[in-house]
Image (cartoon, rainbow, N blue to C red):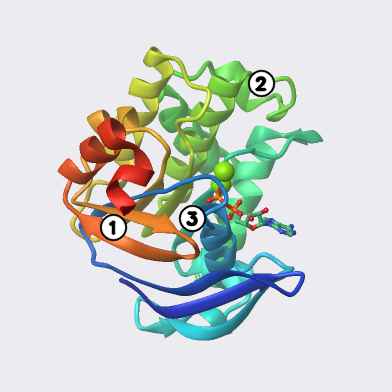
Amino acid sequence: MLKITDLHAEIDGKEILKGLSLSVNAGEVHAIMGPNGAGKSTLGYVLGGRPGYEVTGGAVEFDGQDLLEMAPHERAAAGLFLGFQYPVEIPGVSNVQFLREALNAQRRGRDEKPLSGAEFLKLARGQADALSMDQEMLKRPVNVGFSGGEKKRNEMVQMGIINPKLAILDETDSGLDIDALRVVGDGINRIMRAPDKAVILITHYQRLLDYVKPDFVHVLAGGRIIRSGGAALALELESEGYAGVMA
Ligand code: ADP
Ligand code: MG
Ligand code: MG
């Protein structure tokens, strides 16, 4: 599904990704862990096509297409979903309006018919229910005044509505209490654990991985993947720290 080969990328002329390679097959969950400043978020932004992140070498193939040649909205329409550490707030735009527009823009990009207001509301309510999110939150401006846990829950509702092929979730667990962590973990499993989907979980902590069991764990340090293993590698990192595992 995703094949990253020797990816190099820079911000403001500073090289951050220095030859990163990673392959993700359909049906797999990959966790990426690594020290602060390693380039984890940069990887997510580069895959999403965020302006300012310049790819200077390497290749990324997504579902057989050259991802780096695609505009950000084309990447989304092709099934790539990015969840960020700090979700944006959009005053004046309700969650329902935002989510419906996001979904329908992608549907148009795939030559699918946009959903009507009623069809969309049914879908949105179902996803809010599945994540135990109060229906009232669908009417509120996007993320404005939401707690950290509510933002993450909202992000899972968004992911459920968009129903992507590949989700890249950057520190989705940060700032969550135990109950919210379980809700988010269950949401990821329910929405994304399928033979034709895949997840890349960027996380500092083992605890989310108790809920979403990774098939592979990678250590990203100094702009490349320096070690890969199974779920046990996350436990090893937790007990020995990055320094221990990288030594
Ligand atoms: P991680 O998510 O692994 O903590 P990041 O990808 O956020 O790391 O950052 C990797 C490196 O890129 C860090 O050294 C950071 O300071 C640098 N960096 C990130 N964003 C910018 C930016 N907009 N301008 C300059 N340097 C940046
Ligand atoms: Mg960080
Ligand atoms: Mg980061």
The residue most toward the front is 247
Q: Position of residue 224 (x, y in %)?
A: 43, 67
Q: Amino acid at mark 1?
A: Lys
Figure check: 6 above or below 2: below
- Where disc 2 sits, the SS reads loop
Mark on residue 144? none
Instruction: Specify whether 121 is left or right of 52.
Output: left
Which residue has dot 3 on it?
A: 81
> Can residue 164 be seen in this snapshot?
no
Which residue has dot 1 on it?
A: 197
Q: Position of residue 136 (x, y in %)?
A: 61, 17
Ligand 2 is located in which of the four quadrants? top right
The earlier-in-sequence mark between 1 and 3 is 3
Instruction: Tell me what residue is drawn at x 38 percent, y 59 percent.
Output: 166
Q: Amino acid at mark 3?
A: Phe
**C-alpha separation, residue under disc 1 versus residue under disc 3:** 11 Å
Instruction: Tell me what residue is drawn at x 53 percent, y 58 percent.
Output: 44
Q: Position of residue 226 (x, y in %)?
A: 34, 63
Instruction: Specify whether 98 is left or right of 131.
Output: right
The earlier-in-sequence mark between 2 and 1 is 2
Which residue has dot 2 on it?
A: 146
**Is the N terminus in the top left, top right, bottom left or bottom right quadrant?**
bottom left
